[in-house]
Image (cartoon, rainbow, N blue to C red):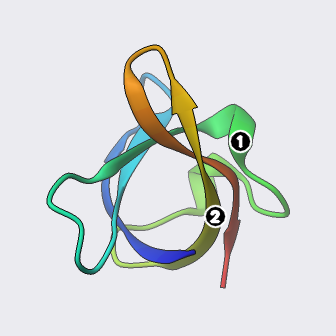
Amino acid sequence: MEGTIAKLVEDKGFGFIAVEGEEKDLFFHKNELQGVNFEDLKIGDKVNFEKADSPKGPNAVSVSRV
């Protein structure tokens, strides 16, 4: 899937990805990043990811910058 970085919570190491056609942004943790450092991400960056279910709902895994 593809989306756009919508929010970054830098002091906690996570953020949210906006996905076209989805109501809620998807949570991602910096541990799920591939080929990019969390510190290098910016709001508006395009990313590829896979969607996975967690106890708190869907989230993004295997996140990489396009």
> Can you tell which mark lies on residue 42?
none
Q: Is the Cβ of the residue at disc 1 closer than 8 Å to that at disc 2? A: yes
Secondary structure beneath dot 2 equals strand
Front of the two marks 1 and 2: 2
Quadrant of the snapshot with the C terminus = bottom right
Q: The disc labelled 1 sits on which kind of residue? A: Glu
Residue 25 located left or right of residue 40: left
Residue found 46% across the figure and 14% down from its top:
55
Query: Which callout, 1 or 2, points at the residue further toward the start of the chain?
Result: 1
Mark pair 1, 2: CA separation: 9 Å
> Can you tell which mark lies on residue 32?
1
Residue 30 screen position, x and y as percent? 63, 38
Instruction: Say above or below: 6 vs 52.
Output: below
Mark 2 is surrounded, within 10 Å at the Cα level, by few (under 14), some (14 to 19) or many (20 or more) other residues, namely many
Residue at the outermost top position: 55
Residue found 54% across the figure and 33% down from its top:
53
Q: The disc labelled 2 sits on which kind of residue? A: Phe
Q: Which residue is mark 2?
A: 49
Q: Nearer the viewer, residue 57 or 9?
A: 57
Residue 50 screen position, x and y as percent? 65, 59
Residue 62 screen position, x and y as percent? 74, 53
Q: Nearer the viewer, residue 52 or 42?
A: 52
Instruction: Say above or below: 37 vs 18.
Output: above
Secondary structure beneath dot 1 equals helix
Residue found 71% across the figure and 41% down from its top:
32
